[in-house]
Image (tube, helix red, strand yellow):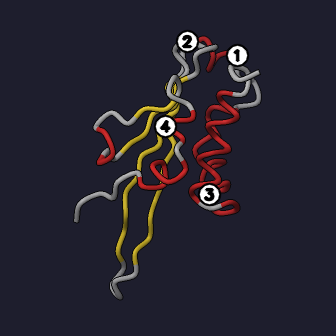
């Protein structure tokens, strides 16, 4: 089965709201979305989208967060926020839903840039 498009982005307009931060490497049919920080060069989050279908045909969207950060940032991250970010993002998706979790993540990464 083909991966779904980022229709949630097209609906919410995140790519248009944050053109310097959000990108879809393969356009709307991408299986991943990147979020870059303009204020922190080298810091990037990548959301990977995939779907799972159970034996009964029920569809489960799965979003995973990958971090791309400079080695120095990892060394300075004493609270292990970068290391625990993927699990925290899954929790956020469970609490807020996909669209609100993505919006929250983008806003938190871009907060400094928009002030």
Image quarter of residue 61: bottom left
**Helix, strand or loop at mark 1:** helix
At a point 62% along the width and 48% down the height, the residue shown is: 89
Task: Give the mark nearest the N terminus, 2 or 3.
Answer: 2
Q: CA distance from mark 1 to mark 4?
A: 30 Å
Above or below: residue 83 compared with residue 96: above
**Mark positioned earlier in the residue sequence (4 or 2):** 4
The residue tagged 1 is 76
Residue position marked by numbered label 4 in the rendering = 15
Query: Circle 2 — which element?
Result: loop
Work out whether mark 3 precedes mark 1 in sequence or the reverse, and give the earlier one.
1
**Residue 27 rendering spot, x and y as whole percentages:** 31, 39
| Residue 93 image label | 3
Q: Residues within 10 Å of mark 1 (few under 14, many from 20)?
A: few
Q: Identify the image quadrant of residue 98.
A: bottom right
> How many C-alpha atoms fall within 10 Å of the one at disc 4: few (<14), some, or many (≥20)?
some
Q: Disc 3 or disc 1, which is closer to the eye? A: 3
Given contact means CB atoms under 8 Å apart, are the residues at marks 2 and 3 in contact? Answer: no
Task: Tell me the element at label 4.
Answer: helix
């Amino acid at each position: 089965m083909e991966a779904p498009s980022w229709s949630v982005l097209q609906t919410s307009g995140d790519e248009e709201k944050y053109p310097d931060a959000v990108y879809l490497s393969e356009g709307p049919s991408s299986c991943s979305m990147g979020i870059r920080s303009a204020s922190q060069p080298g810091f990037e989050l990548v959301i990977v989208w995939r779907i799972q279908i159970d034996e009964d045909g029920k569809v489960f969207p799965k979003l995973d967060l990958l971090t791309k950060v400079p080695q120095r940032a990892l060394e300075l991250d004493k609270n292990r926020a970068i290391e625990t970010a993927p699990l925290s993002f899954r929790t956020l998706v469970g609490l807020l839903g996909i669209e609100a979790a993505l919006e929250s993540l983008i806003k938190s990464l871009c907060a400094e840039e928009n002030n």
